[in-house]
Image (cartoon, helix red, strand yellow):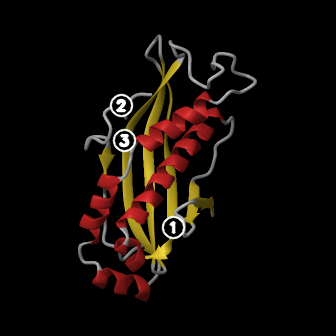
Amino acid sequence: MAGLAGGFPGAILTVPLGVVIGAVGGTACAVASLNHPTANEEFQQILGAADISILKRSLEKAVNAPRAECSLVLADGSAPVAPDAVIEIEKIELGMACQYGQQAYWIAVQWRVTDAAKQRVLGSTTTHCSQKSSRNIDEWFANPGQARTEIDHTLAKTGQHMAAQLLSKENLPRCTFQSRETGELEAE
C-alpha cells in the first residue's frame, strides 16, 4: 500500500463540498440548509476527526485474506515481504448531499496498481461509494461523534469494495449504503 502511509495529509483528501441543499429532497433539504449555514465547515471538522487509515487497513485485510488461488499469503493473513504489486491511492474525495432531508455523502478513491519490480502501471480506476444516513441533517450535525463513526464505517466498506474490484474478473457497480442507528452500514 502506498499513499496513505502519512495518515491524513491534505494532499490525499480533498473535500469538494457544496451546500447541503442537494441532489434530492426539496423542502426538507431547504429547511436543513437554513438550519445549518455552516454545514461545509462542520462537515470538514467531522472529516478531520475521521480515521482515514481505516480505508487502508480494510483494503489490506481484504486483499491479504487467504484465498485458494493465492499461495503467497502467509498463514497470519499478512503479505509476503516483497509484494508482486503495489496499490497506490492517488486521491480521495468526499462530498455531502441531502436526500429527502437525510444526510448523505459520497467517497471517491482514485487508485492504481503497479508492478512492484518494473514500476509499470497494471491498472487504475476510481471507486465510488455513497452513503445515506439513518439520521436527518439536524440529527447528524447535532452528534458529530456518531457522524464520524458513520464516516469511519463508510471508509472501511469502501476499502472492502476496492479489494473486491481488484480481485473481481467483472466490473462491479458503485457501492451504496444506508446506515442503521448504530452507525453500521448495510447495502442499499
- Residue 96 position within the rendered picture, expressed as x and y whole percent measured from the top left: 39, 65
Residue shown at 35% from the left, 72% from the top: 141
**On the image, numbered disc 3 is attached to which residue?**
91
Amino acid type for the residue under numbered disc 2: Ala
Q: Is residue 23 visible?
A: no
Q: Which residue is more in the foreground, 153 or 123?
A: 153
Label 1 and label 3: CA atoms lie apart by 22 Å
Q: Which residue is more in the foreground, 10 or 57?
A: 57
**On the image, numbered disc 2 is attached to which residue?**
5
Q: Residues within 10 Å of mark 1 (few under 14, many from 20)?
A: many
| 151 w.r.t. 137: above or below | above
Q: Which residue is more in the foreground, 51 or 172?
A: 51
Amino acid type for the residue under numbered disc 1: Lys
- Residue 83 position within the rendered picture, expressed as x and y whole percent measured from the top left: 52, 16
Amino acid type for the residue under numbered disc 3: Lys
**On the image, numbered disc 1 is attached to which residue?**
132
Q: Are marks 2 and 3 in contact (CB under 8 Å)?
A: no
Q: Which marked residue is nearer to the observer: mark 1 or mark 3?
A: 1
Label 2 and label 3: CA atoms lie apart by 13 Å
Residue shown at 60% from the left, 36% from the top: 62
Disc 2, SS: loop
